[in-house]
Image: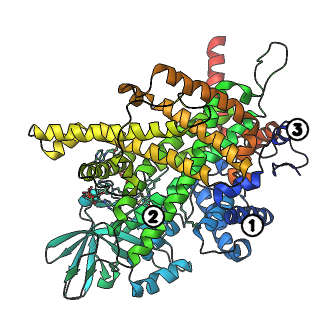
Amino acid sequence: MPLNKEIQPGDNDELTRERLQATFDTQQMAAALWGSDLARKRRELAKKVDKLTVLHDSKDMSFMTREEKLSENARKVVQMFAHVADIVEDPSDDAEMFHLSSNAIGHEGHPFGVHFVMFIPALKAQADDEQREKWLMPALGLQLIGTYAQTELGHGTNLRALETMATFDKATDEFVIHTPTVTALKWWPGSLGKSSNHAVVSANLIIDGKSYGHHNFMVQIRDENTHKPLKGITVGDIGPKMAYNASDNGFLGFDHHRIPRRNMLMRHAKVDKNGVYTKPPHAKIGYSAMVHVRSVMIGHQGMFLGSASTIAIRYSLVRRQGEIKEGSGEVKILDYQTQQHRLFPQLARAYVFMFAGKEVRELYQKVLSDMEKGETTLLADLHALTSGLKSVVTHLCVAGMEQCRMACGGHGYSRASGIPEIWGVAVGGCTYEGENMVMLLQLARYLMKAVKETKKGKSLGRLVDYLLLPQDRHSLIGRVPQGEYGPHLAAFEHIARRQIFKVADELTKLQDKGMSKEIAWQKKAVELQRAARLHTRFYLAACFHRKVQSVVDGRIREALADLYHLHLNYELLDMVNYALEDAYLKADQVDFIREDMYRLLETIRPNAISLVDAFEFSDRELRSVLGRRDGHVYENLYKWAKESELNRADVLPYFDKYLKPMMLAARQRSNI
Ligand SMILES: CCCCCCCCCCCCCCCCCCCCCCCC(=O)SCCNC(=O)CCNC(=O)[C@H](O)C(C)(C)COP(=O)(O)OP(=O)(O)OC[C@H]1O[C@@H](n2cnc3c(N)ncnc32)[C@H](O)[C@@H]1OP(=O)(O)O
Ligand SMILES: Cc1cc2nc3c(=O)[nH]c(=O)nc-3n(C[C@H](O)[C@H](O)[C@H](O)COP(=O)(O)OP(=O)(O)OC[C@H]3O[C@@H](n4cnc5c(N)ncnc54)[C@H](O)[C@@H]3O)c2cc1C
């Protein structure tokens, strides 16, 4: 039995030969990536979805209008829930459900896009027991469709400036929800425009003329039967986007719309019938749904990059172009060092992002169960970690996916490659759930507080313990026996620590000169976000290290270690300027890193297809002609192109309408 379990009869011979070179068992690697239980469940559910034709795309989404896309994905999501008990083992397991949705529906969105990702998590974390009974149960039972309406046309990042009002009317025991200006219209919420009938709405709580800041309220927006907007509510779709166009991101306005007082989510903050307000145990506890999404995004973005890497690497083993040795025939493009250098670091990033995603989810679950008991100590650490990871991971993912697209040459630009859509969805992640730069500055705030603690000899939290350690002056890279990578990881730590302390000192100096804290912050904002990035990249490298150390199987550990070492070299070179600034690294050490990276590209090359096969993305999930598991790319590209709506007739009406009259007139003029 070959170690690569993706080999099947009828596959492209080139791919089979590549797969036979695997040095590890791909199913065991899948277990390392997903966890053994989830890896097995993914395999089984993909087989079941293959058999259930009602879950299959009726045609390629690239050839559909937006309305067709919305309708197609509404059809599939309904079928998916109708068959869910036959397909997944535990429908309450988000991870399993996400993979089902990824196989059957894809990533372009669907009517329940925000329902499961934010609406339900907001209810779980912020509704009290009675409210959970009233809304959470029906939401889980699909009796209603919800969204999360926070962002406004004029305000997204700065939540303190949200304008939507929720004014308490003691006489009727109600809140009056109102949109005072056009900029206060809710704008962007997923599935709001046409699909949802309920929304968790962020609005300023006003009692007796006093504002208590924004809180979350449950608002029914459409009639349950007719689906018409309720009186006092204006709702619609905001129009086409870069990608994610099967989602009806929407706008929403309220004209003095009344809801019962008990529609404010009251697990933590409360308002009683006399208008007495009770503060939550932590000022930012109402932000929990955002933290939830940030925490799931890390692993999912890793999956997006993993998908793009799979497509590009498989295609690079089918595509031949040019010769390395004259007369010996065209080579597979993956044999070019430049192609390997373009793709393998992206593959390594996909792996580490998935590992980091798992670690972050574990911390999120811990904080959630603490919060249930009113304990919020770890909330700040989780906020800092997810803010940094969300920003760095989305940024590197889209940069990496763009490399994957370009590595596929012209065919990468075609929607047949599948990369444009996943790129478009992934790049949205740089903006939604907190614009990246803003979130990096949130982490920077935490890091600056950590420096203050360090100066008192204390650590603010486990994630910043390393700030207490002394700085080495010189790196040991290339000065220790070959194959030891401890000094590489130490270099990440050094670079991060140095930048963090440097910018903290600069802030102090500016303030010592009389500058206000806020202005000093502005003067150093670029350096602060750099500190946040370097801290996060160190976290990622350390996470990769922890993962490799934890693997028991020798062959898996060896293959993962190759990727890890490549990651260390590639990322260090990407930020080498920081290590050169203080002569921590010398020129010969930089050369050493480069040479070792080139060596690792060659080491990884025979395992390349097996490393992407180990993600075990089904063809249905990848939705890519270039990334097909069987490698039969060209005949299927031709088949795909023939499906283009432009090929429905040899001559389209615009020819007779515009081009023919113009050419006839031109011919007549030339005959005169
Ligand atoms: C049918 C299928 C079924 C499938 C089921 C499967 C489910 C699982 C699937 C998951 C899939 C996920 C990905 C899929 C792909 C695509 C899907 C697309 C979905 C898109 C959803 C997007 C939704 C949104 O975008 S919602 C809107 C998000 N908006 C934001 O993020 C706004 C950003 N702004 C902020 O967060 C704040 O304004 C902020 C933090 C910038 C500033 O806040 P504020 O002004 O209040 O505070 P500060 O003064 O700056 O800070 C004060 C203090 O508070 C601390 N703090 C801030 N935030 C937090 C926090 N969250 N927690 C803890 N502490 C916080 C801050 O650090 C300061 O602390 P100090 O100590 O004072 O320094
Ligand atoms: C695909 C998608 C889905 C979405 N889904 C939802 C949803 O379901 N529900 C919902 O409520 N919202 C949703 N959003 C909205 C999203 O959360 C916001 O767009 C996001 O939080 C960014 O806010 P903004 O658009 O106001 O950007 P802005 O804040 O206007 O950002 C513009 C620029 O200003 C900079 N900037 C802003 N503030 C600062 C600062 N303090 N310091 C330095 N620079 C700053 C940013 O870095 C950025 O470069 C979605 C958005 C997208 C793209």
Q: Residue at x 69, y 58 (%)?
A: 31
Q: Position of residue 96 (x, y in %)?
A: 64, 67
Q: Is residue 203 above or below residue 672?
A: below
Q: Is residue 290 above or below residue 319?
A: below
The type of residue carrying mark 3 is Asp
- Label 2: state its secondary structure: helix
Residue 54 — which label? 1
- Label 3: state its secondary structure: helix
Q: CA distance from mark 2 to mark 1?
A: 32 Å
Mark 3 sits on what residue?
13
Q: Residue at x 46, y 65 (%)?
A: 364
Q: CA distance from mark 3 to mark 2?
A: 44 Å
Image quadrant of residue 509?
Answer: top left
Does residue 447 appear left or right of residue 660 in this picture?
Answer: left
Q: Are marks 2 and 1 in contact (CB under 8 Å)?
A: no
Q: Is residue 177 above or below residue 599?
A: below
The one nearer the camera, 391 or 610, is 610
Mark 2 sits on what residue?
292
